Amino acid sequence: MNKESGQKQRILYLDLLRAIAIISISLNHAVNRAFAVQEGQAAETAVLPLYLNVIKTGAAVFSRIGVPLFLMITGSLMLTREYKTKKDISHFYKSNWLNLFITAEIWFFIMFVIIMAISAPDMFRLESLPKLLLRCILNQLFVSQKTLGSMWYMQIIIPMYMLLPVFSLFLHKGFDKWLIPLTGIIIYTQYLIPAVSAFFKMNEIPFAVHTDFGGEGIVHYLFVYVLAGYWIHKNRERIRELVRVRNMLILWILLFAVVCTYQLYAFQKEMDYVLRYNSPGVALCGVGLFILILLVKDVPGFLRKPIVYLSQISFGIYFVHIIIMEILVRFIAALSVSWNPALLMLFYEVVSVGGSVLFIAILSKNRFCRKYMFMIKP
């Protein structure tokens, strides 16, 4: 069930998860541009008909699951790998990490040029060449970056990748149980307390709760997903024995409905609150979907190749779709004011993802683009 023809063995459930994850992430950018998700939530919710509020809420919640899925896939693949020798570790940094870094640098440069040309054309045209070069160099060194918002993920994943062999060695030495208390502390301080605090603030309850224990930082709580992916993949056979697909599907649908209900409730408040990656509901939906797809024994034959291909080019879609979407927003913003927001969201999603697939299919014929721009592996 986990094998595909080709040079390397493919893990079908991870391919399916990767395909779902990139659809989720691209949908996040589409729903944010078609609806008032980040600000003005209450005003929009009050005037939208119920069906549009339901669509908006479902899309907003589902679109938050993609990043957790990608991180869990990273954990399932990278932390289960053993680094027994210096050669293994050296190969990881020279192959996996360096390729990731080169790809990020390429796209940081591309997005810098696009933003300077579209968003700051006067600066691009009038500023002296030395100043432009200095801005570009600083941009590539992660200083005062001018890039699209989606690239925050690369700024997180590059240093996180550097630590993966260290954590893998730690885990394979039998110390994985020692990470359970640490994970519990992170969940308590970075997931539960912020969620309670947001609920109090949203409902104007004059009782502020916060903690400085363990510090703050997005890397803290995102790494929990990496560890979750490792633990789930490591125990996948036992999970398949204990959990039935039907039961897990029902449980996930119920859980997703509850989380959507809470988000819809939040949309009606003046606080402008949207569930984030460290929200317990998002975490449960992400982990639940990961387990659900793990339990899927097979998919129809005609879907296998599209799933595998979408999985292979998912990283490329991540970079390309946001550029296409930004161009669409810039050129149709005035025309789309009267559009149904659900159809506008679908338009952004289909055109940006479809355009990305076409763009990658053409450029990936070049070996350099295939390897370094899109990180397509066999």
Image (cartoon, helix red, strand yellow):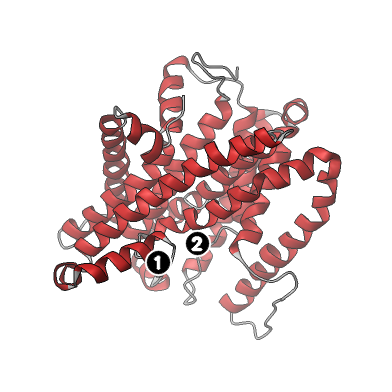
Cα distance in 3D space between marks 2 and 1? 9 Å
Position of 350 with respect to 233 (left or right) is left
Count the marks: how many?
Answer: 2
Q: Position of residue 70 (x, y in %)?
A: 54, 43
Dividing the picture into quadrants, the one containing residue 244 is top right
Look at the numbered disc 1 and give the secondary structure of its residue: helix
Residue at label 2? 264
Tags 2 and 1 touching, CB below 8 Å: yes
Q: Which residue occupies 69% across, 40% down?
A: 230
In the rendered structure, which amino acid carries the disc numbered 1? Thr
Kindly give the residue lying farthest to the bottom in the view shown. 206
Is 338 rendered above or below residue 349? Answer: below
Residue at label 1? 45
Residue closer to the observer: 128 or 239:
128
In the rendered structure, which amino acid carries the disc numbered 2? Leu
Q: Where is residue 287 in the image (x, y as percent from the top left)?
A: 64, 44
Q: Which residue occupies 51% across, 46% down?
A: 66
